[in-house]
Amino acid sequence: MTEDAVPVGTALQRASDGRSGPALDLSKPATWRALGREFGAPGLVLFGLLAIAFMMQWSHGGPQAWGLSGQALRDGRWTTLVSHMFAHGGFAHFLMNISALMALSPIVLVRLGAGPASWLRYAALFLFAGWAGAALYLALNPFGAVPMVGASGAICGLWGAAARVDFDGGFVPLRSAQVWNHVKAFAKTNAILFLALFALVRLTGGVGGLAWEAHLGGFLFGLFAMPLLSGMRAEAITADVPSPPEGEGAPGGGG
C-alpha cells in the first residue's frame, strides 16, 4: 500500500457517501488506481458488452444494419434504437469510445452510490443519455437514411454527468466554473472531431461524419440528470475553484 492510498480511499468513501471531505487530486496515478479499484466494475462489464457487440456486428449485417436513422424507423427497425449504441464503424471508432468510457465511468460511479442500485443507475444513465442523443439526432435529421452508430451519445452523457461531480461531496451547480470548463472542453473536442472527419471524408471520397447532435443530446442529459439519479442536491462549489473570467459568464441553465 502506498503512502497516499489511505487518504485517497478516505476521500473516495466520503464522496460516495455525499459527505464533504478532502478533494481528490485527479493528476495523481494513485487517485485513478483507487477509482478503478473501487468503482470500475460496471464500466468493465459495459466494456465487455460493447466488445462482444463489436465482434458480432460483422457477422450480423455490419454497422449499417445496426445503425439508427429516420429511414430505419420508418422501415420498422425499432431495435436500432438500442443496437446503434453498441455498434461501431471500425476499430478506431470503438477504441476511442472505450477509452472515454473507462475514464469517465469511475468518476460518475463515485456519486451513484453502492451495490446493485448503483449499477442500475449507471445503466439508466448510459441508456437514457444514448436515447436523448438519438432523439436530438432524429429531430434534426428526420428524413436521413445514413445510419448513425456508436456509443458516443451515451458516453457524452457520462461526460455531462462527470461535469457535475464534486469530489468534496455532492454536486456542483449548473452555473459553476467546473461545469463551464467542461462545456468549453466538450465544444472544442467536438469541433476538432467534426473538422477532422469532414477533411477525412473529403479526401477519401467516403460518406459519413460526426453525429454531433447525438453528442450534444447525451451531454445535456447527463448534465441535468446526474443529481436526480443519485437523489442528492447540488451543493455550492468550493471556494478554491476559480470563477469564470469577467465577460465570460457561465451559460444559463448549463446549456
Image (cartoon, helix red, strand yellow):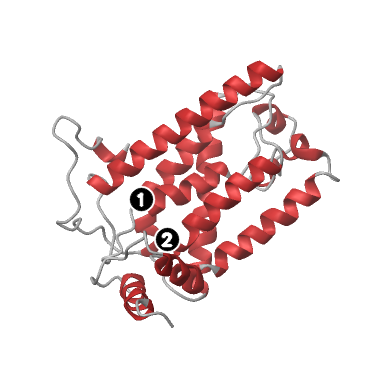
The residue pinned by badge 1 equals 163
Residue 239 place in picture, x, y as percent: 14, 56
Sequence-first disc among 1 and 2: 2
The residue pinned by badge 2 equals 107
Disc 2 on helix, strand or loop? helix
Q: Quadrant of the C terminus?
A: top left
- How far is the residue under mark 1 from the one under mark 2? 9 Å
Q: Amino acid at mark 2?
A: Ile
Residue 56 place in picture, x, y as percent: 80, 50
Q: Residue furthest bottom?
A: 1
Quadrant hosting residue 182: top left
Q: Up-down: is 29 above or below 89?
A: below
Q: Up-down: is 27 above or below 39?
A: above
Lateral position of residue 119 relative to residue 253, left or right:
right
Look at 44% across and 48% down and name the residue there.
159
Q: Is there any visible trace of residue 84 in the rendered image?
A: no
Look at 50% across and 68% down and name the residue there.
36
Lateral position of residue 171 relative to residue 71, left or right:
left
Residue 148 place in picture, x, y as percent: 64, 33
Q: Residue furthest front?
A: 3
Look at 42% across and 61% down and name the residue there.
107
Disc 1 on helix, strand or loop? loop
